[in-house]
Amino acid sequence: MRRSIAYREPEPISALNTTPLIDVLLVLLIMLIVTIPAATHKLPVDLPNGPPSGEVVMPHRLDISASGGLAWDGRTISDAELPALLASTVAANGELHFKADEAARYERFAKVLTTVKRAGVTRLGFVGNERMAFD
C-alpha cells in the first residue's frame, strides 16, 4: 500500500524581525552621543543689558607690529608702560581694540594678551580679522 504524503504550505512567521529595529536604534544612539558634547559646549559672553547709555566712550587701540613692538592709540610704547595704560582703561570702564600684525609671532601675541587679561580688561575686541568672517 502506498502512502500519500501531503505537503503543506509553510505558514508565515508571525514574529517581528527586530534586527533592523536594533540597527536603527544603535545608529540613533551613536548620533546622540556624538552631538550632545557639541550642543553643551558654552562660551561665556557678557552682553549689555538694557538701553545703551548716552555716554560714548572712544575705545583705545593696542597694536602689535610685525617686529613685536607695541603701539597705544598710534603712539609707540614699551612693555613697562602697558599695565598702567590698561589700568586707566579698566578704571574708565573703557573698551580696548586689539590688533596684531599677521607677521607678528604668536608668543608675543599671547604674552601681550596675558597682560591685558591680568589687568582686568573685560571689554576687548579683536581688529583685523574681518577677512575671516563668515558670510
Image (cartoon, helix red, strand yellow):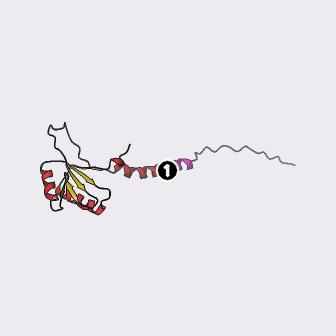
Q: Which residues are magenta?
A: 1-28
Pick the residue in front: 58 or 4.
Answer: 58
Left or right, 13 with reference to 87:
right
Dividing the picture into quadrants, the one containing residue 112 is bottom left
Which element carries disc 1, helix, strand or loop? helix
Q: Residue 90, image x and y in percent?
A: 15, 51
Q: Residue 70, image x and y in percent?
A: 21, 58
Dividing the picture into quadrants, the one containing residue 114 is bottom left
Q: Main secondary structure of the magenta part?
A: loop
Q: Give amino acid for label 1.
A: Val
Left or right, 102 with reference to 75:
right
Q: Is residue 18 visible?
A: no
Residue in the picture at 46% in, 52% down? 30
Residue in the picture at 21% in, 42% down? 48
Q: Is 104 one of the magenta-colored residues? A: no
Pick the residue in front: 118 or 32.
Answer: 118
Disc 1: which residue: 27
